[in-house]
């Protein structure tokens, strides 16, 4: 089992550094300290190895993030206003991204190329999050805090900006000098008010 753990660790590192397509199984074997054939004893194809890395992240990380724990931590709380809700949403996901940076990098790099990953992500979102998100949006529309835009438009604007921030921070520019607290505040501000003066 140690060789399997070494293979997963080596593949995670190399996929994060070079991407799935640019990484060969011989490179993974070399970094893992095993023969290349050992990889194929555990995984039929390189894509099976990718799924072994990303699917547990979905099952153990993203599903709790999108489901019960996430709902309890974010969606099932009371907030004085919509800004407080957005702040909690961003801070909650920021900590998740900080703890899972390499896996998120692999996941987002490969999401566009593997339909299995897209289907899994879509299913998780539709099953565990969409209704709760709709409820929150309807609540703050009712309080007069949000424009009367379609819920899907509001949701898309929020998700695009928040996920974009996380990808830039932890995937595209993880080694830049970030002032995380300021960036979180800036993100909240422009999500809610835009970027025009």
Image (cartoon, grey):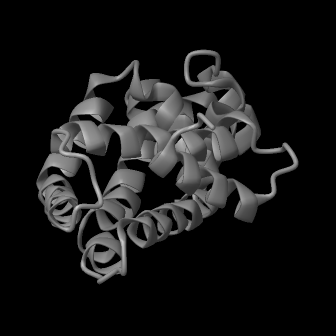
Q: Residue at x 63, y 20 (%)?
A: 24
Which quadrant of the view contains residue 26? top right
Q: Position of residue 31 (x, y in %)?
A: 75, 38
Q: In the image, what residue occupies the spot 37% across and 29% down?
A: 44
126 displayed left or right of 8: left
Residue for point 72% across, 65% down: 181
**In screen coordinates, is 86 left or right of 135?**
right
The outermost residue toward the front is 197
The C terminus: image quadrant: top right
In the image, is residue 143 above or below residue 100? below
Along the line of sight, the residue nearer the viewer: 48 or 1: 48
Task: Please provide percent x and percent y for residue 35.
Answer: 65, 34
Image coordinates for residue 7, horizontal then vertical, percent = 59, 44
- Nearer to me, 91 or 11: 91
Quadrant hosting residue 72: bottom left
Q: In front here: 185 or 149?
A: 149
* Above or below 144: residue 101: above
Q: Residue drawn 52% across and 40% down?
A: 194
Residue 120 pos. (x, y %): 24, 40
């Amino acid at each position: 089992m140690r060789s399997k753990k070494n293979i997963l660790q080596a593949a995670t590192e190399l996929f994060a550094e070079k991407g799935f397509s640019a990484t060969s199984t011989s490179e993974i074997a070399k970094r893992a300290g095993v023969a290349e054939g050992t990889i194929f004893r555990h995984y039929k194809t390189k894509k099976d190895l990718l799924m072994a890395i990303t699917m547990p992240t979905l099952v153990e990380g993203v599903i709790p993030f999108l489901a019960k724990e996430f709902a309890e931590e974010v969606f099932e709380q009371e907030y004085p206003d919509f800004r407080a809700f957005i702040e909690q949403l961003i801070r909650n996901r920021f900590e998740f991204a900080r703890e899972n940076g390499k896996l998120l990098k692999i996941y987002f790099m490969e999401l566009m190329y593997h339909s299995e990953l897209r289907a899994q992500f879509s299913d998780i979102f539709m099953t565990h999050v969409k209704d709760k998100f709709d409820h929150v949006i309807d609540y703050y529309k009712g309080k007069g805090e949000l424009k009367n835009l379609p819920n899907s438009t509001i949701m898309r604007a929020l998700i695009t900006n928040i996920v974009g921030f996380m990808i830039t921070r932890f995937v595209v520019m993880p080694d830049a000098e970030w002032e995380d607290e300021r960036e979180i505040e800036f993100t909240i501000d422009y999500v809610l008010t835009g970027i025009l003066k």
